[in-house]
């Protein structure tokens, strides 16, 4: 039986999010495969681990007090992690983010989700500490998990000293499930945008593309799921169309309904290490249009409409094509359902276990 230690980092940092969802899906399945899985997060902040680790509710705290508390909890958890790794014998240490060091016992496995910080270090005010943390931990890993072939290529590009056969490519699965008799978040026809809107997520170009479309169709709206309230700058940029842009935070069930009832889902991101929302759209039978960049063609195959993320007219043209062609939407839904069979969390967990076994063999 392989013993695995996952640390606290992403459970404390994220309430929801792709990385914490990944850790949850993999760790829970490894337990069912017979692995001895250990994790500890004092004052857990993450929704997915609320049952197994308990949930610390910060919703009623002021932002300053909450952040100061999280700083304290980070120190406490870091200390607890050091104790756990020193006192227990674990075959595998798999940190949930990049702030870690190589254990004195056991093998170190690092999952690289993307190289966003490195790619945009000279353009966006990203956290340089993350880049330094990755430089410290990635070369020390006994094996590396990349979430796509594109991410594997990016790793080799930024770390040419790492041998390609040291990297295991393991795809994510789809966590989203369609809801029976799901409700729509809007009473209007809408195009769906999901997640964060800043930086490389390319929301500003998407909103410009949608303004072109809104000038052509009086009954088309935009619904943004998650990502926080619209900023004053965003609202100003919407101009005369501001009443047709909507935003709300959604539960998983509500998000499923948002996908199912949308005219289409649009993913205009300039760069993704994988692209989980594409799988969510497939799972919820929502036709999709997305960027023809980074990992998105690898994940999406022939099941979406593609566009150049830097070209607003190309983007609007792809969305219009979906809006105006019900047959095309139905065809993409069928293709997306078939494509989804390539991405399965059970398969991901089995491949992760194989990666651990390779590390233990020194391969």
Image (cartoon, rainbow, N blue to C red):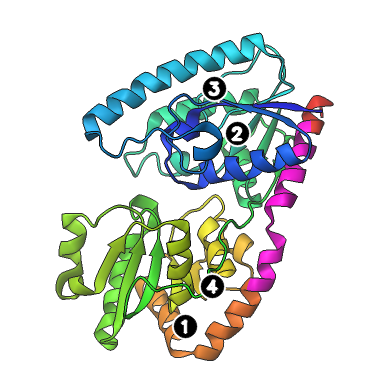
Occupied quadrant, residue 266: bottom left
Q: Is residue 358 left or right of residue 293?
A: right
Rendering coords of residue 122 (x, y %):
36, 40
Q: Is residue 23 shown in magenta?
A: no
Rendering coords of residue 105 (x, y %):
71, 14
| Numbered disc in front, either 2 or 3 | 3
* Disc 4/disc 3 C-alpha distance (Å): 43 Å
Q: Is residue 349 shown in magenta?
A: yes
Question: Which region shows up in magenta?
Answer: 337-356
| Numbered disc in front, either 4 or 1 | 4
- Who's the residue at 27% across and 67% down the image? 246
| Numbered disc in front, either 2 or 4 | 4
The residue beneath circle 4 is 180
Of residue 256 and residue 333, the one placed in the foreground of this image is 256
- Who's the residue at 77% across and 44% down the image? 350
The residue beneath circle 2 is 159
Mark closest to the chain's N terminus, 4 or 3: 3
- Who's the residue at 79% across and 39% down the image? 354
Q: Residues within 10 Å of mark 1 (few under 14, many from 20)?
A: many
Q: Is residue 103 above or below residue 32?
A: above
User: Is label 4 in a helix, a strand or a loop?
Assistant: loop
The residue beneath circle 3 is 100
């Amino acid at each position: 039986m392989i013993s695995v230690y996952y640390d606290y980092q992403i459970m404390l940092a994220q309430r929801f999010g792709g990385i914490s969802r990944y850790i949850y899906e993999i760790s829970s399945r490894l337990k069912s495969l017979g692995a001895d899985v250990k994790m500890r997060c004092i004052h857990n902040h993450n929704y997915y681990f609320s049952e197994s680790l308990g949930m610390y509710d910060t919703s009623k705290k002021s932002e300053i007090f909450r952040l100061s508390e999280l700083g304290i909890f980070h120190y406490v958890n870091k200390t607890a992690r050091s104790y756990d790794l020193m006192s227990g014998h674990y075959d595998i240490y798999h940190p949930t983010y990049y702030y870690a060091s190589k254990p004195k016992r056991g093998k170190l496995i690092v999952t690289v989700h993307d190289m966003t910080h490195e790619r945009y270090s000279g353009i966006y005010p990203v956290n340089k500490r993350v880049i330094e943390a990755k430089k410290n931990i990635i070369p020390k890993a006994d094996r590396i998990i990349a979430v796509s072939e594109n991410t594997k290529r990016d790793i080799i590009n930024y770390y040419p000293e790492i041998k390609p056969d040291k990297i295991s490519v393991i795809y994510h699965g789809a966590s989203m499930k369609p809801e029976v008799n799901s409700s729509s978040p809007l009473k209007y026809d809408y195009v769906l945008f999901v997640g964060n809107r800043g930086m490389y997520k390319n929301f500003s170009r998407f909103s410009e593309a949608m303004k072109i479309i809104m000038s052509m169709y009086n009954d088309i709206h935009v619904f943004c799921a998650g990502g926080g309230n619209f900023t004053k700058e965003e609202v100003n940029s919407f101009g005369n169309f501001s009443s047709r842009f909507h935003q709300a935070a959604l539960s998983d069930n509500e998000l499923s309904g948002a996908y199912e009832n949308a005219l289409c889902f649009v993913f205009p991101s300039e760069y993704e290490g994988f692209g989980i929302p594409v799988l969510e759209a497939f799972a919820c039978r929502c036709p999709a249009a997305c960027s023809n960049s980074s990992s998105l063609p690898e994940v999406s195959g022939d099941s979406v409409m593609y566009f150049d993320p830097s070209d607003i007219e190309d983007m609007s043209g792809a969305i219009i094509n979906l809006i105006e062609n019900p047959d095309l939407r139905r065809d993409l839904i069928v293709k997306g359902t078939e494509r989804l069979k390539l991405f399965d969390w059970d398969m991901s967990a089995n491949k992760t276990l194989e990666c651990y076994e390779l590390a233990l063999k020194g391969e």
